[in-house]
Image (tube, rainbow, N blue to C red):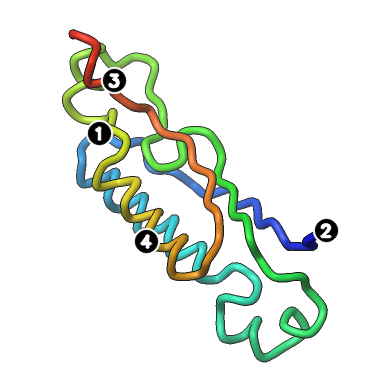
């Protein structure tokens, strides 16, 4: 049986009015992964390096990088908020997962390309 550490990150999310907001939120999420135990230099030199099982899982909450605004019309969501999976946004998390050899759980509002508007 593998023993590992799971990090749950409760990030503050700026509600994404634009694609730029999404990019900024993702940047912050990736920064928070970098400071998880064993990834930051302070953790690798201190108590965590000696006493923690390796981090293998990082979890984010719902609306990880998009936020949610229930008053927006569907067109605003479709044109400015929802993403396609796979896509640019999920690729950034995939790169970070490969960098640290971990699994990352995110939640995203996605668009099914097979559905018509």
**Circle number at residue 17:** 1
Circle 1/circle 3 CB separation < 8 Å: no
Closer to the camera in the image, 64 or 98: 98
Residue 44 is left or right of residue 34, and the answer is right
Circle 2/circle 3 CB separation < 8 Å: no
Image quadrant occupied by the C terminus? top left
Q: Is residue 44 above or below residue 10?
A: below
Q: Secondary structure at mark 1?
A: loop
Residue 47 is left or right of residue 55, and the answer is right
Q: Secondary structure at mark 3?
A: loop
Residue at the disc numbered 3: 112
Please tell me whether mark 1 or mark 3 is closer to you in this view.
Answer: 3
Please tell me whether mark 2 or mark 3 is closer to you in this view.
Answer: 2
Q: Secondary structure at mark 4?
A: helix
Closer to the camera in the image, 63 or 44: 44
Tell me which label, 1 or 4, sits earlier in the chain.
1
Tell me which label, 1 or 2, sits earlier in the chain.
2
Residue at the disc numbered 2: 1
Residue 38 is left or right of residue 116, and the answer is right
**Circle number at residue 95:** 4
Tell me which label, 3 or 4, sits earlier in the chain.
4
């Amino acid at each position: 049986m593998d023993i590992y550490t799971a990090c749950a990150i409760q990030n503050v999310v700026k509600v994404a009015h634009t694609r730029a907001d999404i990019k900024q939120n993702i940047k912050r999420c990736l920064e928070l992964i970098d400071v998880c135990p064993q990834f930051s230099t302070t953790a690798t030199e201190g108590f965590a390096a000696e006493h923690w099982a390796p981090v293998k899982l990082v979890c984010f909450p719902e609306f990880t990088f998009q936020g949610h605004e229930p008053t927006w019309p569907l067109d605003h969501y479709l044109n400015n908020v929802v993403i396609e999976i796979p896509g640019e946004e999920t690729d950034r998390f995939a790169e970070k997962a490969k960098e640290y050899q971990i699994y990352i759980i995110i939640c995203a509002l996605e668009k099914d390309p097979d559905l018509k508007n």
